[in-house]
Amino acid sequence: MPVFFFALSFVGSIHWLHAIAALLIIHLLIYPSSNGYNSYMDRDTDSIGGLEKPEQPTKELFYVTIAMDIAALLLAYFVNPLFAFGLVVYILFSRLYSYRGIRLKKYPVIGYVTVVLNQGALIFALVFYTADKTGVQDIPLIPLAASIFLIGGFYPITQVYQHAADKKDNVRTISMLLGKRGTFVFCGIMYAIAFALLFIQYNSTGSIRMFIILQLFFIPVVFYFIKWFVAVFKDEKAASFKNTMRMNMLAATCTNLAFITIIILHQIG
């Protein structure tokens, strides 16, 4: 949800019906379908992807993901044909990422770029275009770039506890390439670039107050990130499933609340 609310926070005049439809289609159909397909292909036995003890997927899960994709595309077409086309692109690259015949996820850089462009730039553009009541197609490029770096800073952290499971599956992630300590440094740099871009955006539009509000919401995230990084630097075993889930939950909650607050402030003037 963070990228959805992030994109929506830059829409001047929101078409609320389209925005709600996009929210439900993306988060109740597209994302679960992609996660389900990835689980079907991975067949993990160790903690991974938010599940400490994942159950083995069945063939029925594969059929469910197809049904969800079809439903999502049909609904998206009625909202906006271009929105539906964009979701086709998202589904395609999501499958290329997971499908064992191609398996982009086993290549650290290509897999990483696929995720940040798909979940960052593409989702940002689709939400902005679909939710904009004016129909203006000039998507703000600085926030679009910031979405790439926000996902770029978040995604490797989700892989930091999965090294053993990924190695067993012959997958080499960007986090494995960087190492556990290096992952934290890399993610910190990505977030710094993202916030630098957001400062430029908010400052250029006379909305520096929004940037300050965003920083206030991120104080708990930064505090936990630094505390966790110090723990991992001392002992890499601290890069555990439970600590990762705590980070994910805290970051998602604070990010969502921050951008929802900014949306409300924008809409009430």
Image: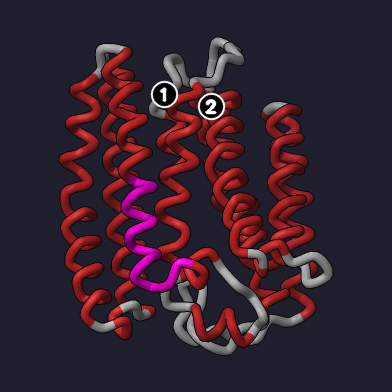
Up/down of 158 relative to 147, above or below = below
Are the residues tagged 2 and 1 within 8 Å (C-beta)? yes
The numbered dot on residue 44 is: none
Which residue carries the number 2 mark?
Answer: 128
Q: Position of residue 203 (x, y in %)?
A: 27, 18
Q: Provide the residue span drawn in magenta.
A: 178-191
Q: Position of residue 38 (x, y in %)?
A: 66, 68
Asked if the stretch drawn in magenta spans residue 183, the answer is yes
Residue under the image location 57 percent in, 39 percent down = 123
Q: Position of residue 195 (x, y in %)?
A: 31, 36
**Magenta portion: prevailing SS class:** helix
Which residue carries the number 1 mark?
Answer: 10
Q: Camera-side residue: 228 or 265?
A: 228
Residue under the image location 30 percent in, 53 percent down = 253
- Element type where label 2 sits in the image: helix
Asked if the stretch drawn in magenta spans residue 205, the answer is no
Q: Camera-side residue: 19 or 112?
A: 112
Whether residue 200 sits left or right of residue 138 in the image: it is left
- Element type where label 1 sits in the image: loop
Residue under the image location 47 percent in, 20 percent down = 14
Q: Could you tell me how far apart the alpha carbons at marks 2 and 1 are, in whole angstroms?
A: 8 Å
Q: Amino acid at mark 2?
A: Phe
Q: Amino acid at mark 1?
A: Phe
Residue 40 visible, this orientation: yes
Q: Residue furthest right?
A: 101
